[in-house]
Each structure stands twice: as C-alpha cells, then as structure tokens.
Amino acid sequence: MAAESSAYPEPSDFEVMRPTYREKDDGFVQATISISPFRVKGESSSKAGARRAALYEAQKTYKSYHPGYSIKNPFPEHFVDGEGMEWHRLPPFERGTYGDYKFIDDQGEEDYVDIDTMLLWDVRPKDILEGEES
C-alpha cells in the first residue's frame, strides 16, 4: 500500500511556526498560523489558548485530507482545571449526543461541552486524576 501524501503540511509543521495574534472586539484572541498557502486559525480567551486551538484546527484539516489520521485529544481523560472544576471525557457512544467532556459547574449542575468550546474557553488541566478508566 502506498503512503498517503498531499500538499497539506503535517500538523506538527504548524507547531514550529510563530502565530500572528489579533484581539477581537468580543475580547477573544485569534491566532493564525500560516504555512503558505495554508492557514489555520484558532480562537480563545488567551494567546496561548488561541495557539492551542489553531494547532487543533491543523489536525482537523489534515484529517480531511487523510481520513485515516487520528486527531490527538489536547486534554487528558480526567482532570481538574485551574479553577477546581473536574472534567471527565465521555465514552464514545455518548459524545455524539452530549459532547466530548462533562463537568460540574459552580451551581452543582452537570453540563457537557465539546473540545472546540473547551479550547475557546482556554480550559487547562491543573491536576490529572489517576486511577480512573475511560
């Protein structure tokens, strides 16, 4: 079987490029990473988060050219973020209905969200929880 190839750069090629940043009117930051003629954009509440979102977009775009490519999850399966919120990745059969992760909000309500929204919110793991199977 021949190896897949395309003009689209590997996702890791975008990691070494310096993004350009633009603050948007809504308070979010947009990062653009270019490898001519290709460009990926990510948006988040911080520059670092916007870069992470752009790199995730590079993986999603690469997958559109190479369907066999596996997108790497930018988050651990189970973790606590810097604000003390606990996050749990949902099993594959629930992701289509609810999203990628569930969390308990500050009112004690369980909620669900997808990875793109987590990147937009700039969710970052503080502590990775051990001893839980996915």
Image (spheres, rainbow, N blue to C red):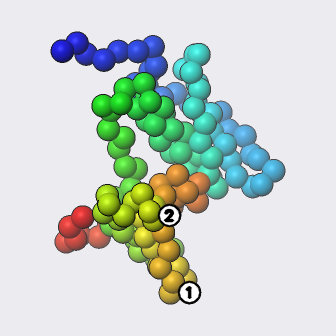
| Mark toward the viewer: 1 or 2 | 2
Is residue 100 visible in the rendered structure shown here? Answer: no
In the rendered view, would you say 1 is above or below 101?
above
Q: x, y percentage for residue 20?
A: 65, 33
From the image, tell me which residue sits under label 2. 113
Q: x, y percentage for residue 49?
A: 56, 50
From the image, tell me which residue sits under label 1. 107
Which residue: 63% across, 46% down? Answer: 43
Is residue 102 visible in the rendered structure shown here? Answer: yes
Asked if labels 2 and 1 touch by Cβ distance under 8 angstroms, the answer is no
Q: CA distance from mark 1 to mark 2?
A: 16 Å
- Residue 44 as seen in the image, left or right of residue 1: right
| Quarter of the view holding residue 41 | top right
Label 2, secondary structure: give it.
strand
Which residue: 59% across, 26% down? Answer: 39
In the rendered view, would you say 39 is above or below 100?
above
